[in-house]
Image (tube, grey):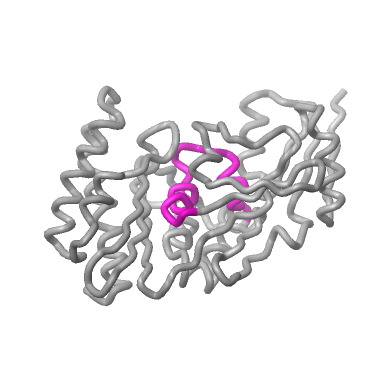
Amino acid sequence: MNSNRFYAPETIQALTELLQQKKDKSDIYFVAGATDFLIDIKKQGIMDFTTIDLTHLEALQQIETRDDCIEIGAAVTMAGLEESPAIRSHATALAKAAATVGSTQIRNRATIGGNIAGASQSADTVTACLALGATVVLLNSGGELRELPLEEFILGIGLTQIKPDEVLIKIWIPVGSNAVHSGFAKVGSRKSVTISKINLAARIVFQDKYIAEATMYFGSIGTKAVRAADMEKHCIGREWNETLMAGLFELGSRQIDEAIPTRSSRPYKRIAVKGVISDVFDDIANQRGLI
C-alpha cells in the first residue's frame, strides 16, 4: 500500500518546519512545476514518497529589481521569465533561454528553481544564469540563508551543493549599466520542444565601441556548463564585428575538440557551435543597433 503525503506551505516558517523533517528522510521531494519530477519517479519506479509543493509560497513567485540585482523566486516559471520586463531588459540571455524551454504548456509550469536544482548538463537557464553571474540562495531547516555562486553550486549532472535540509528559494542576477548586453542561442534535434544539443550564453560589457568584459558559457558539452575562457579573452579590447566573429568560430570549434575529443557527436558539434555563436553575435549586435 502506497503512503504518499503532500504538503503545500504558504509561509517561509512553514517551509522551514518541513525542512526539519526532510533532513532525516530521503523520500521527500520538492516540486513546483513537477515537469521533471513526474518523469523521474516513473523512470525510477518510485511509489512511496512525500512531496512539498513550493507554488503556494508567494515570495518564491516574485521577480523584484533591487539596487544591484534582480531577485528571482525559485518558483517563477519559464513563461514568467520570458515575459518579465526586468528580465528582458537586464538579463536578456535568461529571457531568451526561458523562451526556448519545451512547449508553451511546459513553460507555463516549469520553474527556474527546478531547472537549476535539476543540474542537467543541457539546462538552458543554467547556461544563461552562469553567463550572467548568478548567485543562488538556499534556506535550511534552521531558517538560515546560504548564498553560493551558481558556478560553485552545480557540481555535475544532477549534482549540486544543496544539503539534505536545504531548499533553493531565490536566484540573484547582478544588474549592470546600459553598456551591458547578453544573448542566448541553442541547437537541438528539431526546431521546437527540443533539448539542447549545444547552447551558448554570453554577457558582454562595452566601453564606447570596444568590449571591456566578456563572459561566455557553453551547455551540453560536458557534465556541467563549460566556460569559454579563450573566447572571452579574444573579445577584450575588440569591436563587435565580423572579424571578431570569425575568430570566435575558430575558438568555438577548438573548445568542442577539447571538451568532447572522443565523443561521436564531436564532428556535428564542431559545426553546430558556429551556428549558436552566430545567433548570439547577431542578438547582441541588434541590441547595440549594429545591424
Q: What residue is shown at x 38% (from left), y 68% (from top)? A: 180
The picture places residue 224, in percent across and down from the top left corner, at 44, 36
Q: Is residue 112 magenta?
A: yes
Horizontal side, residue 97 vs residue 241: left or right: right
Instruction: Residue at 55%, 32% (x, y): give it.
Output: 158
Tell me the quadrant of the picture where the N terminus can be found: top right
Mark yes or no: residue 26 visible.
Answer: yes
Main SS of the magenta part reads helix
Among the 4 quarters of the image, the one containing residue 68: bottom right
Q: In the rendered image, which quarter contains the C terminus?
A: bottom left
Extreme-left residue of the structure: 243
Count of marks, rendered view: 0
Q: 122 or 154, which lies in front?
A: 154
Q: Position of residue 128 (x, y in %)?
A: 44, 53
Q: Is residue 1 left or right of residue 168?
A: right
Q: Nearer the viewer, residue 194 or 185?
A: 185
Residue 189 can be seen, yes or no: no
Q: Quadrant of residue 286?
A: bottom left
Tell me which segment is drawn in magenta.
109-133
Q: Position of residue 219 (x, y in %)?
A: 39, 42
Q: Which residue does the image show at 47% across and 54% down from the upper left? A: 133
Front position in the image: 137 or 272: 137
Rendered location of residue 131, percent (x, y): 41, 53
Image position of 219 (left or right of 74): left
